[in-house]
DNA sequence: TTTTCACCGATTGTATACAATTGGCTTCGC
DNA sequence: GCGAAGCCAATTGTATACAATCGGTGAAAA
């Protein structure tokens, strides 16, 4: 019961990170033997790691055929965001009701650090770090609902972060995103759960709109490339 | 890509059913070799099945120590119902917006069959069958959100059904439950998504209250039994 | 009597070999 | 030229053996 990891857990963790970061591309095949060659060990822990990735929806695995990194259409992403919107706005409402004053202070400090980070970066980016340094993660923790935490942070967030990476930055306008975060925290600090929920809904809806725009642009780029390749036929 | 199952999938499915039905009790240890003895095959597919159960939150698995069937406190169940309430009321709202007229008719027929079933049983029970014959399942299908379907039917429902089995019946008052279902369907048919959502919230909140009552009664029974065993000391 | 420590058998994690299945390639027929 | 059928190597699923870890038990110490 120590921090020692089994090899399968270690490989899972590293693979999940590689997938989220796009080092293994959507649609790419995961071959057991190739992963043995890459990570060492034997096929047994690799299989277990692949099955864990499947459980987290990061890969699609077909018996006897193998596993591929998941590749989601915009429609599928919309489904995910539709659910995320509901769960995270609920988390925000609960956080406003359940977070202690100390925890809220900690959240406010986190945003101050984020503000400094944006300034240092000259307003160019607002990259959400993982774990306790991530605004959204802290809100979900503040909901004090373990199952909610598990469903969002254990499942949905892998996919969401994967697509954030793919679209290169987490936010087009960092200062606007930070300001939205600040408004949300103000509502939480004021214990106004209804307002907190509404602001979070808007925030996530804006994220979806942003993501839709980018994926449509990518799709158009991809189409024009494809068209010029087909002209000879 | 046929309906043929791997052994690990088959064992997972049978184990999941056995857990949901209480044939394997909460807290009970799952030993790999014992399951090989019971289901045949070798340890490899059994391990895979156990990992799948873990992914569905039906077992708690500790590396090097083994897996036990999950045993949830009332507080943990409340967390689950809190999330279920949010997701399923959302599903209901979406169903009111997205179900076709034919699908709604199918749902109405389903409730008619349920009504006949209750009459045949002389008002004693309203047992929800699984899959397409389950009212809630049909609403979630009607939401047309695959991710929502996966999170509810792929994950949460296993646990919820497990505790339904444990509390012996799915409803204390079958005719009241049926009437609530009927009101929900009327709201969906009228495309009143707001009302549909509200009615579903109430319905699920009533389920939670019912479950809480039963678990508290079980706990009191368990305590009184425990006390009388300790009196000799 | 209670607590602590050491040992070891049982169980779980991994390595290796064998069995089963599929996708891709080639050939044949229309 | 296209579609269907057959073949087989590569890959995945499972079986078996070995390695690693932990929980339970018994003995010793306080």
Image (cartoon, coloured by chain):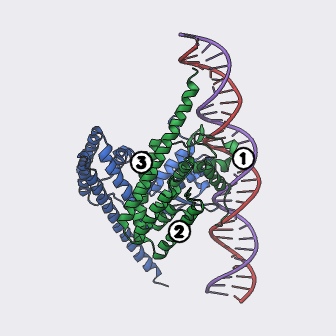
Chain colours: A blue, B green, C red, D purple
Q: Which residue is mark 1?
A: B38
Disc 1 to disc 3, how far (Cα)?
36 Å
**Quick one: A122 or A192, which is closer to the camera?**
A192
Q: Can you say whether B124 is above or below A209 in the image?
A: above
Q: Position of residue D26 (x, y in %)?
A: 68, 19
The crowding category of the residue bearing disc 3, from other C-alpha atoms within 10 Å (few below 14, some 14 to 19, many at least 20), is many
Q: How many marks?
A: 3
Task: Indicate the secondary structure of the residue bearing disc 1.
Answer: helix
**Relative to the observer, which residue lies in front, B105 or B37?**
B105
Q: Is residue C15 left or right of residue A90?
A: right
Closer-to-camera residue (A208/B161): B161
Q: Which residue appears at 36% of the width and 58% of the height?
A: A85
Which chain is mark 3 on? A
Name the quadrant containing residue A208.
bottom left
| Cα–Cα span, label 3 and label 2 | 39 Å
* Element under disc 2: helix
Residue A195: x and y in percent read: 26, 54
Which numbered tag is attached to residue B231? none
Q: Which mark is residue B112?
A: 2
Identify the residue at image location x=27%, y=39%: A101
Q: As drawn, which residue projects farthest toward the front?
A: B122
Q: Chain of mark 2?
A: B
Q: Which residue is mark 3?
A: A149
């Amino acid at each position: 019961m120590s921090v020692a990891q089994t090899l399968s857990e270690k490989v899972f963790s590293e693979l999940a990170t590689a997938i989220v970061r796009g080092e293994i591309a959507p649609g790419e095949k995961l071959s057991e033997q190739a992963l043995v060659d890459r990570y060492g060990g034997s096929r047994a822990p690799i299989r277990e790691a692949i099955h864990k990735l499947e459980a987290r929806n990061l890969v699609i695995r077909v018996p006897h055929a193998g596993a591929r990194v998941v590749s989601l259409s915009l429609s599928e992403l919309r489904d995910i965001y539709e659910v995320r919107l509901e769960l995270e706005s609920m988390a925000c409402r609960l956080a406003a009701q359940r977070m202690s004053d100390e925890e809220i202070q900690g959240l406010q400090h986190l945003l101050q650090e984020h503000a400094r980070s944006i300034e240092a970066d000259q307003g160019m980016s607002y990259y959400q770090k993982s774990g306790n340094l991530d605004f959204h993660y802290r809100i979900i923790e503040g909901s004090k609902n373990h199952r909610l935490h598990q469903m969002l942070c254990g499942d949905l967030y892998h996919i969401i972060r994967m697509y954030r990476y793919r679209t290169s930055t987490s936010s087009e306008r960092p200062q606007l995103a930070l300001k939205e975060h600040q408004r949300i925290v103000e509502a939480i600090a004021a214990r106004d759960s209804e307002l907190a929920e509404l602001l979070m809904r808007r925030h996530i809806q804006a994220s979806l709109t942003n993501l839709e725009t980018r994926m449509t642009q990518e799709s158009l780029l991809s189409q024009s490339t494809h068209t010029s390749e087909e002209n000879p036929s």
